[in-house]
Image (cartoon, rainbow, N blue to C red):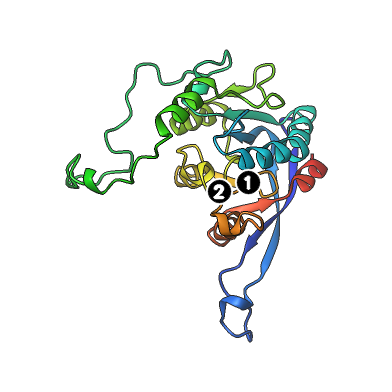
Amino acid sequence: MENKSIDLQLRYLRRLTDPGVEMKEKNLQYARVLKQLPMDQTALIALDIWDRDLLEDMRERDDRITRERIVPVIRACREAGLQIIHAPTMEIAVRSRNWVNLLGDEKPPDRPYPQWENSPTWPPDGSLRAFEFPKEPRFDAAFKQELEETDFHELVKPEGDEAVIGNGEELHRLCAQRKILHLLYVGFHTPGCMNLRDYGIPAMKQRGFNCVLLRDCTNGMEAPEHFDDQIGMKAFIAFLERNRTYTISSDELIEAL
């Protein structure tokens, strides 16, 4: 695997039009570029692929995508020797024998974003509590159930020595240990955990990694009026592709492996 590369036609959404084409958003086009990703510097990130979700229809769609799209990708990665890193949240990670546990007793910073030397501590903690979202009536019971019972999807459990990380700092340190530069993402949801987790795509891009989304190996978090056509997911994928994040399909990765 040391000298082998994966040849991928990576898709992105161009930000400008060709010369002579009217500079309008509706005239923008998708483009593809061939890139070679060294196998020993690349990992598949299985993000929040769980055995349950609080919303039944979302769970049904997640399960179908997992079985039909993600499972074949993981099987192909295992057969090809591409390393897989499972990122299921810290609550699930600590229960796994494959948890890397790279942080020991270290505590996260009070404020997760980088601070300038003279940056003020503002707003004060608790000053905006009155403006927080109203609490859902079923939140406590639902969150407790999810926290205590959620586990890896039955078909996407870690095998062998596949690593399990609990947060972005663990993923960063593991990648540094293994000299990983390229992260191929599958999992849920887009938008949602794929963009909000500290081990998701935007956070890991900020840390300097090349992140690629398998666009048919995820699901959206939709408003009721566009649940059926998944406008939210499609729009966020286009946003990523327009902002320096490549995408590919599951079939393209499997064929390249």
Horizontally, residue 54 falls left or right of residue 167, namely right
Extreme right residue here?
255
Q: Which mark is residue 219?
A: 1
Of 130 and 38, nearer the camera is 130
Q: Is residue 194 above or below residue 32?
A: above
Q: Is residue 184 visible?
A: no
Of 234 and 32, nearer the camera is 234
Residue that appears at 35% across and 40% down: 135
Q: Amino acid at mark 1?
A: Asn
Q: Amino acid at mark 2?
A: Met
- Circle 1 packing at 10 Å, graded few (<14), some (14-19), many (20+), is many
Residue that appears at 55% across and 60% down: 239
Residue that appears at 65% across and 27% down: 153
Of 252 and 71, nearer the camera is 71
Location of mark 2 (residue): 221
Of 214 and 42, nearer the camera is 214
Q: Are marks 1 and 2 in contact (CB under 8 Å)?
A: yes
| Res 86 → quadrant | top right
